Structures are given as C-alpha cells and as structure tokens.
Amino acid sequence: MSEPRNIKKVFRSKPTVEGAGVRLRRAFGNAETGLFDPFLLLDDFRSDTPSDYLPGFPWHPHRGIETITYVLEGDVEHGDSLGHQGTIGAGDVQWMTAGSGIIHQEMPKDDAQGRMYGFQLWANLPASHKMMDPRYRDVTRQSIPAVTNDGATVRVICGEFEGVSGPVHDIVTEPEYLDVTLQPDTGFVRATPRGHTVLAYVIDGEGEFCRADDPFAYDVQGANYFDTERDKLLGNRTLVLFDDGDSLTVSTHDEPVRFLLISGKPIDEPIAWYGPIVMNTRVELRVAYDELREGTFIKHG
C-alpha cells in the first residue's frame, strides 16, 4: 500500500562565511552529518550585494565527494589543477565529481544588476567510488528540459519527471534534482523511491508541504513552526526534510512557490569529514592532507 511522506524536520538556512569571505546561507552542513545521507551540505549564495560574493572561493582541494553548482543569475568562473576552465552562467549546472582528488577555484561574478544567485550541493561518494577518476558534467541551461503540467513547471537536472530525463546520468547514489515552480492554487504530487532521502528547499514564494499528523513534534530551531493554519505555508530559505514513504505532496494557496526537490539513495557508511575532503576514516583523511603537503594529492590528470 502506498504511504505518503510526512515532514521529519524543518530548517531555516543560517548565515555563514566561506571561501575568501563569501557571505552565504547554509541550509545544512557538517552539524547535520548523516541526517541527509547521501548529501552533506547545501549552500545558498543568492545576493544582490557584490561584496558578499566577489571574494569567491580561491584554490582549494576536494576528495571523496561530488559538488553540484546551480546558477540562477550571474556567472561563476572556474578552473582546476587538471586544466579545465570555463564559466557557469545563469540556468547552468556544473556536476563535478572530485573522486580521488582535484584542486579548483570558483569565482562568482555579478550580472548587470549586481546579482549573484546560486546554490551548491555536496553529495557523498561511497567507499568504492571515493578514489574514482575526477570528472565534470557541464550542463547548459538549454540542455535542461522543462516540463509543464497542471500548473507545475519542472526543470529536470537529474532524474526523471513525466517520462522526461535530465541530462545528468550514471550517478552512484541515484539522485534526483528538480527545480519546481507551482502556480497559485496548484497541487503537486511526486512519487519517491522508498528508502531514499528526500528534501525540498524553498527559493521563492510559499507553499504547504505535506505535514505530519502531529505538527507539534516538528520545529524550526527549537520553536514550534505549526502553531497556526498560516504556519503551514513555508517560504523562502526554508528546508523540509521528509520521513520515508512512497510520495510527497505540495500545494499552493494565493501565491506561487518555487523549490528545489532533491533525493538520493543513502550510503550508510562512516563519515570522516574535515574541510573540503570527506572520507570514511580518520586515517584516510590524514593521508589526503599529507598528500596535499607533499604534492602527491592529484592522482589523475
């Protein structure tokens, strides 16, 4: 029998500073290790103030993870130790598999209005793939299909919606990454694989996400979020983590809502995480940082 997903927990993204002084908001990260398996971190770097983001993310290493950068406005110029360089523009996605190791930089650039809007998701790799060859998938906005149906418009970055597949395939954690916009007075039902981690991050408007039978058990940073009927509507920079089940529902009232819908198959392995490197053991972490100091970090190139 099909079972709908309820809300497990609601979060508000929190201000933080990363890179060379980039001011952004973190929806989840190291403090929630394991709760979002296979995902590790989701950063929201939307800003209309160039000084918030122009310091950028100068040269830094990654090993054992994938970084998924989705840009809505502005550009992100990037380069790496393997000789790749380019620009991620508005509507584009870069799906980078760091694997055995890569050193790169990401430098945000504003658009004509001074805007830089985007998100970066970190996805873990299982032990069997931690030391795989690094690879890039540079996905242009033109290659991301958009499906419109019954008041919903869905950009399919990874996974499948209404029989339409996204351009990113062959990812070991079987992720789905959708950019969903619902018009006012619209209902949206999405089937989800049982056992997969599913989350939604609201980036515009407000919507009612499937709520638990006991709303008082779920809170935002210690405060009950569902005291009133109005509180069922979750808005910008709110993240919803769902319980297990076969489907989820989202509905709108007077306003539209736009959200990122992300899911993946949990890895269920130990996590040893320090900075931009995520391995399974502390010994593996020490090896990685020793190799950085010794100049032997890059294995393929």
Image (cartoon, rainbow, N blue to C red):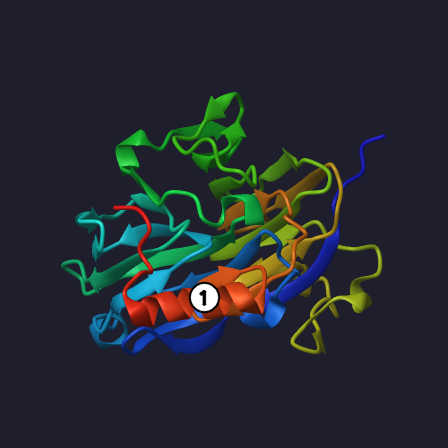
User: Which amino acid type is shown beneath numbered disc 1?
Assistant: Val
Residue at 62% x, 57% y is 36
Residue 156 percent coordinates (x, y)? 44, 34
Label 1 crowd bin: few (<14), some (14–19), many (20+), radius 10 Å: few
Location of residue 152 with respect to 69 vertically, above or below: above
Local secondary structure at mark 1: helix
Q: Is residue 278 left or right of residue 77?
A: right
In front of the other: 80 or 21:
80
Location of residue 263 with respect to 124 vertically, above or below: above
In front of the other: 132 or 56:
132
In front of the other: 187 or 123:
123
Q: In which quarter of the image is the N terminus?
A: top right
Residue 273 percent coordinates (x, y)? 53, 67
Residue 60 percent coordinates (x, y)? 30, 66
In front of the other: 147 or 149:
147
The reply to whether residue 126 is visible in this rendering is no
Residue at 29% x, 43% y is 92
Q: In this view, does 17 lie to the left or right of 92?
A: right
Residue at 61% x, 68% y is 32
Furthest residue in direction left, as rendered? 112
Instruction: Give the labeled residue for mark 1.
Output: 287
Residue 177 percent coordinates (x, y)? 49, 42
